[in-house]
Amino acid sequence: MIYHLAEQAHWQQALREGAYTRSTRGRSLADEGFVHASSAEQWPVVRSRFYADVTEPLLLLHIDETRLSSRVVHEVGDPATGETFPHVYGPVDVDAVVDTTLLEPPHA
């Protein structure tokens, strides 16, 4: 299982279109080339580091990698530490999202 923090409006759009195409906060899949994801241990840190100033609730997408039609590559996300993160190279199929968790602010 991998995880992605999503704005609610973007997830609602994905449900209408059949695929999620946001990469990260403020960037699309087209902008970035992949969708940022995290492990179960990583997403809380990503939430506090990159979403601390968000005042709206976020959705945590629980993504089953085996249901994705796009490939997942684990790549170094922080060269200083060598920590790797899962990157989804293509849209996230809505059917691959097996659960969502509403995360109320504060996100820090």
Image (tube, rainbow, N blue to C red):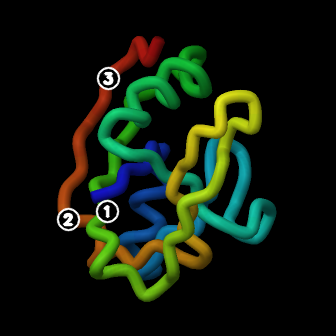
Earlier in the chain: of badge 2 and badge 1, it is: 1
Where disc 3 sits, the SS reads loop
- In this rendering, is residue 34 above or below 91? above
Q: Which mark is residue 98?
A: 2
Query: Could you tell me the amino acid type at mark 2?
Result: Val
Nearest the viewer among 54 and 42 is: 42
Find the residue positioned furthest to the front.
Answer: 82
Image point (59%, 16%), residue name: 53
Q: Nearer the viewer, mark 3 or mark 1?
A: 1
- Dot 1 alpha-carbon crowd within 10 angstroms: few under 14, some 14 to 19, many 20 or more: many
Find the residue positioned furthest to the right.
Answer: 31
- Quarter of the rendering containing residue 22: bottom right
Nearest the viewer among 67 and 100 is: 67
Which residue is the site of mark 1? Answer: 63
- Quarter of the rendering containing residue 42: top left
Is 74 displayed left or right of 5 in the figure?
A: right
Is 52 displayed left or right of 12 in the figure?
A: right
Where disc 1 sits, the SS reads strand
Q: CA distance from mark 3 to mark 2?
A: 20 Å
Q: Does the residue at mark 2 contact the one at mark 1 (Cβ under 8 Å)? A: yes
Residue 3 picture location, percent across and down: 37, 50
Find the residue positioned furthest to the bottom.
Answer: 69
Query: Could you tell me the amino acid type at mark 1?
Result: Ile
- In this rendering, is residue 65 above or below 18? above
Query: Could you tell me the amino acid type at mark 3?
Result: Glu
Which residue is the site of mark 3? Answer: 104
Q: CA distance from mark 3 to mark 1?
A: 20 Å
Residue 15 picture location, percent across and down: 36, 71
Q: CA distance from mark 2 to mark 1?
A: 6 Å
- In this rendering, is residue 103 above or below 24? above
